[in-house]
Image (cartoon, rainbow, N blue to C red):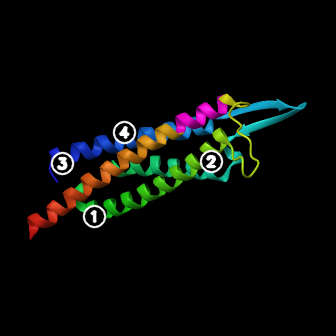
Amino acid sequence: MNKTQWIPIVCLRVIAMVSTFVATLLMVTSHDSAKVLGMTFQAKYNNSPTLKYFVVVSIITTVYSLGALFVPPRKLGRHVLVIDLIIMSFLISSFSAAVGIGQLGKEGNSHAGWIPICGQVPKFCHHVTASLIAGFVAVIIYFLLVLYSLNNVLNLVAFKA
């Protein structure tokens, strides 16, 4: 892989790493409390297993993206591509699950009798929303990274044939 093919991959990895780091940071710092009928309720990301899953996948993606920057592209290009696909799958699943919980917190569910909570804990909801936006950026960047890497691997195979 020559330098012109390597530079976009590095840029995409850095952007993905930064966006997953920001998503993690925003989600971990999301907390707020509300008083209802004299009782104080706290909203934190770790109250929901789905948001914990989002944080864990974002941390793994951040660490992997940092480590993948130091892998020589010629030696392990195909292996990195496979791991990128796995990471992208986990990112998509954690992002989708977190968006579902976020939507439930924002809108509630009248059929189940769940009321929306964002009116009572707006700081928490704003942090979660910003974290999900950063997570969405990471998903898009990883998708582009996988497409670009796949194109490079296929061109390398076609060039050798």
**Foreground residue among 110 and 152:** 110
Asked if residue 78 lies left or right of residue 25, the reply is: left
Which residue lies under the disc numbered 4?
Answer: 15
- Which residue is drawn at the image coordinates 47% and 38% (left, top)? 134
* Front label number (2 vs 3): 2
Asked if residue 113 lies left or right of residue 107, the reply is: right
User: Residues at badges 2 and 1 in contact (C-beta under 8 Å)?
Assistant: no
**How far is disc 2 from disc 1 in space, using C-alphas?**
35 Å
**How far is disc 4 from disc 2 in space, using C-alphas?**
26 Å
Three-letter residue code for mark 4: Ile
Above-or-below relation of 113 to 160: above
Query: Mark 2 or mark 3: which comes first in sequence?
Result: 3
Residue 100 percent location from the top left of the image: 58, 49
Query: Mark 1 or mark 4: which comes first in sequence?
Result: 4
- Give residue 5's mark: 3
- Magenta segment: 123-131
Label 1's element? helix
Query: Mark 2 or mark 1: which comes first in sequence?
Result: 1
- Which residue is drawn at the image coordinates 48% and 38% (left, top)? 133
View extreme (bottom): residue: 161
* Front label number (2 vs 1): 2
Please tell me how crowded label 4 is: few (under 14), some (14-19), or many (20+) other residues with Cα within 10 Å: some
In the rendered view of the protein, which quadrant contains the C terminus? bottom left
- Give residue 78's mark: 1
Dominant secondary structure of the residues highlighted in magenta in the image: helix
For residue 16, which quarter of the picture?
top left
Which residue lies under the disc numbered 2?
Answer: 101
